[in-house]
Image (tube, rainbow, N blue to C red):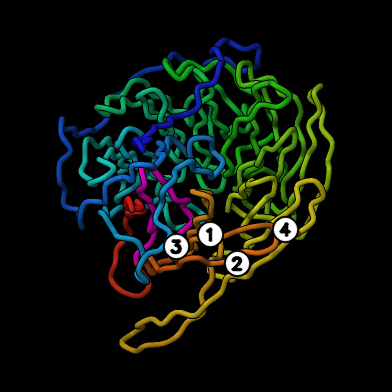
Amino acid sequence: MAARHTSCAVIALCVTASVATAQFEDPKPPKVHKLESIASPKPTDYAALKFFGAPKPLNSKAFITDWPGFLGPRRDSHSQETMLLRKWPKDGPKLVWSMRRGEGYSSPVIVDRRLVFTHRINKKIHIDCLHAETGKRFWRVTYPSDYRGVYITNSGPRSTPTVSEGRVYVHGIQGQLFCLDLDTGRTIWERDLAKELSMVDDFFGVVSSPLIVGDVLVQSISCPKGPTVVGFDKNTGKLLWGTGKKWAASSSSPVFAKIHGRDRVFVLAGGESRPPIGGLIVLDPKTGEPDFEHPFRSRLFASVTGATPVVGDNWVFLTSSYGVGSAVLSLAADGKFKERWKNRHIGLQFSNPVLHAGHIYAIDGVSNRPGAIICLDPATGKELSRTELNWDETVLDGGRIRKISVSIGEGSLLVADGNFLCLGDQGHLLWLDVNPKRTKILARSWLFKANETWTPLALSRGLLYACQNNDAHFGDQPARLLCFDLRRPDQ
């Protein structure tokens, strides 16, 4: 059969950028500031890169896609890629290249064999554009950062870039919003939302990733007097609308969906505030006008809402930790809603749930502690199955060999090629066969022996990208961005 090497970029949505009637005006015209940058017409080597060997050729029957933003092309932890490798050696799939990297929890994004990744080294944030198959660098854009987190010592970027129509959109941890040319790294426009809109830190800095809907860039932000959600013209950086005055941004990212044939954006807000308040905002991406707001936040001041909303067939699943739990709201054609069910016993901190074949799958776990794969019925909230994933590993610790018990903890899920990939928060990679009755491990390996592996996986053209966010606990491996070969060869 002929090869089906097909590329899928950000979904093109029929939305025209127009000035809204919202209550916030653009505080100043966009300005472009010169950033420190290096660029090369061809990808080049650099000291932090290690190349281990070229990946296998793509399978002639493989369907391949780009990975242009947080959680993939549709921001739902699904990949359409096929012909992926199901079995690998005990030490894992083949490592193609690795890059020693700085602080941060941002995911890589991949479009047209260009990978964009942002991280922090000392007091500088680097936005790197790399060749996705070799790790060599096309360009690097750098800007200073003095951010220091209160709750997490890692002070690197959290937000994942978004690529749309040859441009890269990056929201920095202190509120800088950049639009860069994907080919060259040239700055097209830039905003400083902290200065322009009096944006505040909000527990963890900027965590929410930009969402592109047609010509509108949607972002949730934390401003004491509002707005909570803003829409920019993605081509010029002009502020089109702002919505909300009472809720700060959470660590959750906005998602797009069609509800009863209408384009809508779902934003789960609720960060630092006294008293602690927040919840779901459903709005029109053209105008920023909300359909409704629904309170959904912990009563604890120091808490985090990190998981994205999951939108089904005219319903939305919400989840949050610290005593909030999970719920499904039914959405009516007139913009109104009704709470279908609520369960306070299952609430995710920042691991993202996945809708697959009509069921909700999630990792019910806490970092560095046991975790389980659960399946929920979105119609009733009933827990259909729970599979604990725990096992023993042998490690060399302080010169002696000992056995430790490990699990997936606060891991992440990715649906690909008919099964689930799972990255545990201590660096384990698992292929899972999942259905409403049970979860079965098909393959498992320990990619790296480090914790806080909270960054979701990325998958493009048969290559899997994983972030080792900390130095290894056992061994001397530094924090790295890793590329693995998951291409299944032709038979």
Q: Given contact means CB atoms under 8 Å apart, are the residues at marks 2 and 3 in contact?
A: no
Q: CA distance from mark 1 to mark 3?
A: 10 Å
Q: CA distance from mark 2 to mark 3?
A: 14 Å
Magenta span includes 470: yes
The structure residue drawn at horizontal position 65% and vertical position 41%, both measured from the top left corner, is 309
The amino acid sitting under disc 3 is Leu
Indicate the secondary structure of the residue bearing disc 4. Answer: loop
Tag 4: Cα neighbours inside 10 Å, few (<14), some, or many (≥20)? many
The amino acid sitting under disc 4 is Ile
Start-end of magenta stretch: 453-471
Indicate the secondary structure of the residue bearing disc 3. Answer: strand
User: Pointer 3: what residue?
Assistant: 429
Q: CA distance from mark 3 to mark 4?
A: 24 Å
Q: Please state the horizontal and vertical placement of residue 361, each as a whole percent of the image.
A: 64, 53
Q: Please state the horizontal and vertical placement of residue 137, each as a whole percent of the image.
A: 21, 41
User: Pointer 1: what residue?
Assistant: 411
Indicate the secondary structure of the residue bearing disc 2. Answer: strand
User: Along the polypeptide, which appears first: circle 4 or circle 1?
Assistant: 4
Judge whether residue 27 can be spotted in this image: no
User: Pointer 4: what residue?
Assistant: 346
Tag 1: Cα neighbours inside 10 Å, few (<14), some, or many (≥20)? many
